[in-house]
């Protein structure tokens, strides 16, 4: 919905599906994360469609329909990987914040967003009730001693900001645990090409750039 050019859609799809990070996920057998990675753009597309319907002053029944679709989509994404679901949620909140800044009738959008939250929370909670309810009555699993320290986090965090911004898996191409490879300078062309394909007003491109930088930092 952001890129209108047909070739732009084809190229960005290939970049998203064939970059080193995704190839390492599939070759390494991390299918849960891989499924979440593949499903994540659909969740964002549904969220963008839902936001457009809210801005077009559609009937309440139409809004609730898309609220339910969006809630089911995020519930499925959480079942694959909650981390990517949280990242998508941050992007969606960023979209709403951006619209609120430029929209005149903020009260109407806030009201619609509140209704969306009231619809989404029961759906997502009910979808995951099979493990949420037992977890309330079962003692939480304790991490081994030392796993919650800063040193342990740094030890298991192989990726750096440069890996995230260039879509390069830190173990690419050998996929050996703990063996971090140097980043090929050619990888810098991937994000440059991706943003070049977004032929939108400079403000919108800047907005996407900020989201990408924040996401890369969090990754």
Image: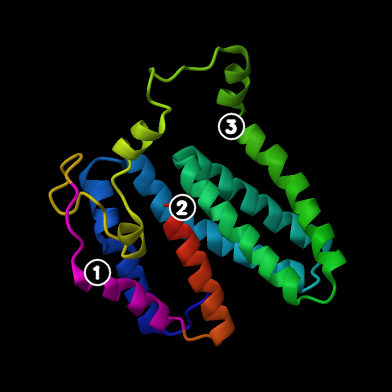
Tell me which label, 3 or 1, sits earlier in the chain.
3
Residue shown at 57%/60% (left/top)?
Answer: 91
Mark 2 to mark 1: distance in Å?
19 Å
Q: Could you say which is closer to the camera, residue 45 or residue 21?
A: 21
Mark 2 surroundings: few (<14), some (14-19) or many (≥20) residues within 10 A: few
Residue 197 pos. (x, y %): 40, 82
Vertical order, 137 against 34 (above or below): above
Is 155 part of what is drawn in magenta?
no
The residue carrying mark 1 is 187
Q: Secondary structure at mark 2?
A: helix
Q: Is the Cβ of the residue at disc 2 closer than 8 Å to that at disc 3?
A: no
The residue range painted magenta reads 180-198
Vertical order, 3 against 49 (above or below): below
Q: Is residue 42 left or right of residue 159?
A: right
Quadrant housing residue 184: bottom left
Q: Is residue 181 left or right of residue 90?
A: left
Residue 125 pos. (x, y %): 65, 34
Residue 71 pos. (x, y %): 64, 48
Name, please, the residue furthest toward the left: 174
The residue carrying mark 2 is 218
The numbered mark at residue 128 is: 3
């Amino acid at each position: 919905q952001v890129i209108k050019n047909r070739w732009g859609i084809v190229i960005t799809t290939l970049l998203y599906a064939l970059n080193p990070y995704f190839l390492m996920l599939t070759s390494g057998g991390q299918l849960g994360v891989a499924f979440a990675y593949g499903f994540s753009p659909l969740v964002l597309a549904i969220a963008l469609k839902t936001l457009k319907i809210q801005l077009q002053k559609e009937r309440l029944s139409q809004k609730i329909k898309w609220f339910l679709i969006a809630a089911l989509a995020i519930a499925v994404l959480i079942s694959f990987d909650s981390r990517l679901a949280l990242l998508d949620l941050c992007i969606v909140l960023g979209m709403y914040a951006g619209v609120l800044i430029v929209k005149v009738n903020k009260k109407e959008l806030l009201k619609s967003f509140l209704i969306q939250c009231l619809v989404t929370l029961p759906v997502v909670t009910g979808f995951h009730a099979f493990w949420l309810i037992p977890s309330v009555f079962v003692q939480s699993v304790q991490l081994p001693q030392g796993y919650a320290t800063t040193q342990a986090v740094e030890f298991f965090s192989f990726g750096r900001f440069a890996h995230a911004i260039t879509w390069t898996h830190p173990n690419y191409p050998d996929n050996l645990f703990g063996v971090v490879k140097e980043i090929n300078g050619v990888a810098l062309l991937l994000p440059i090409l991706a943003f070049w394909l977004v032929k939108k007003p400079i403000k919108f491109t800047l907005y996407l750039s900020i989201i990408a930088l924040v996401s890369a930092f969090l990754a």
